[in-house]
Image (tube, grey):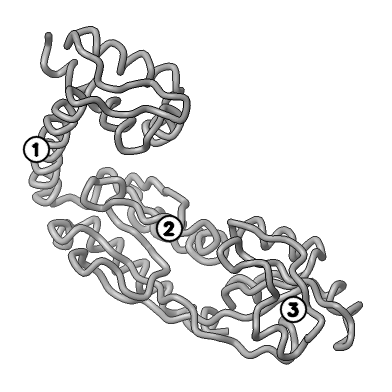
């Protein structure tokens, strides 16, 4: 079998192994799940063995599969090493630059900064991945990552741009209807449990949880709709015209904002210039992040 073509099929098997099933693998590869299924089956046909057992709750790797995955990881590592060694010699202020950053920081501040950057460096071809998830800079999922994190992976290279605080916010109309003695509704994150947070109960002893969410974009929409109050970063809550701070609850420190890259890339001109540009522009908004 042609080795390049096999590596291509191996990539699909590796994604299924990493993500435990077709749908998640398809999402990360940006294809539909029947493509993943077809490519894995094609690889199994070429090799004449089953790499995965198809179980009702997902794919389970076989002993043959484990050997194939070992090879796939080794091939991937070599491709990445080659990729990194070529990319780190890149001396132009032109070419592709893939950046990950949290959606809401893009919405409130970074969109403007990215716009200024593309005007200043039109030859740099910017791709933005809007996510708060940790993208893997070693696997080149992004070249640069803006992250809200207190202690980033110390094998990465970068700098802390700013500190931030968070507060409780509610819509102006919702807060107008609430008196201290009435029930105030809290919107918790799922990992925050079923009870109203202690800092809210101190001021509003009748507080209760109205709903739980797994995502800040959704919480923001629900607070704007008047479902209740929620804790959010000051840069976000203060930027929403319809929202105001909940009285009687103190602000708290929240994750720092860092800009990070793979250590081999710190001298690549377009990465260096981008990191400096973004860090300097974001630093000027420090007071908004502290509230």
Q: Earlier in the sequence, mark 1 or mark 3?
A: 1
Task: Give how far across and how far down residue 217 sits, in percent.
Answer: 62, 57
| Crowd around label 3: few <14 · some 14–19 · many ≥20 (10 Å) | many
10 w.r.t. 185: above or below:
above
Q: Quadrant of residue 76?
A: top left
Q: Earlier in the sequence, mark 2 or mark 3?
A: 2
Image quadrant for the N terminus? top left
**Residue at coordinates 52% horizontally, 66% vertically from top-left?**
109
233 w.r.t. 92: above or below:
below
**Residue at coordinates 24% horizontally, 60% vertically from top-left?**
261
The secondary structure type at the circle numbered 1 is helix
**Residue at coordinates 24% horizontally, 55% vertically from top-left?**
270
For this rendering, which residue is in front, 273 or 28? 28
Check residue 244 in the rendering and tell me which mark sits there, or answer none: 3
Compared across the picture, whether 101 is left or right of 106 comes to left
Task: Give how far across and how far down residue 32 sits, in percent.
Answer: 46, 23
| Crowd around label 2: few <14 · some 14–19 · many ≥20 (10 Å) | many
Task: Give how far across and how far down residue 250 sits, in percent.
Answer: 63, 90
Image quadrant for the C terminus? bottom right
Q: Which residue carries the number 2 mark?
A: 101
Task: Give how far across and how far down residue 49 sits, in percent.
Answer: 20, 13
Disc 1/disc 2 C-alpha distance (Å): 28 Å
Which marked residue is nearer to the observer: mark 1 or mark 3? Answer: 1
The secondary structure type at the circle numbered 3 is strand
| Crowd around label 1: few <14 · some 14–19 · many ≥20 (10 Å) | few
Q: Which residue carries the number 1 mark?
A: 78
Q: Quadrant of residue 203?
A: bottom right
Compared across the picture, whether 74 is left or right of 217 comes to left
């Amino acid at each position: 079998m042609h080795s390049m073509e096999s590596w291509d099929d191996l990539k699909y098997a590796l994604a299924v192994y990493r993500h435990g099933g077709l749908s998640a693998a398809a999402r990360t590869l940006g294809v539909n799940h029947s493509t993943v299924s077809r490519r894995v089956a094609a690889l199994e046909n070429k090799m004449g063995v089953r790499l995965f057992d198809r179980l009702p709750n997902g794919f389970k790797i076989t002993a043959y599969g484990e050997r194939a995955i070992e090879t796939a990881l080794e091939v991937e590592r070599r491709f990445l090493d080659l990729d990194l060694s070529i990319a780190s010699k890149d001396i132009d202020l032109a070419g592709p630059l893939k950046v990950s950053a949290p959606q809401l920081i893009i919405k409130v501040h970074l969109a403007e900064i990215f716009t200024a950057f593309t005007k200043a460096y039109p030859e740099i071809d910017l791709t933005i991945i809007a996510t708060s998830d940790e993208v893997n800079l070693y696997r080149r999922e992004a070249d640069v990552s803006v992250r809200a994190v207190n202690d980033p992976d110390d094998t990465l290279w970068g700098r802390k741009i700013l500190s931030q605080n968070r507060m409780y916010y509610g819509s102006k109309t919702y807060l107008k209807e609430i008196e201290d003695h009435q029930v105030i509704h809290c919107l918790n994150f799922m990992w925050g449990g079923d009870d109203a947070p202690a800092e809210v109960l101190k001021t509003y002893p009748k507080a209760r949880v109205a709903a739980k969410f797994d995502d800040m974009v959704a919480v923001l929409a629900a607070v704007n709709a008047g479902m209740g109050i929620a804790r959010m970063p000051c840069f976000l809550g203060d930027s929403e015209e319809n929202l105001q701070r909940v009285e009687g609850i103190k602000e708290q420190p929240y994750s720092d904002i860092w800009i990070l890259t793979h250590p081999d890339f710190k001298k690549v001109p377009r990465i260096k210039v981008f990191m400096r540009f973004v860090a300097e522009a974001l630093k000027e908004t420090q007071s908004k992040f502290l509230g």
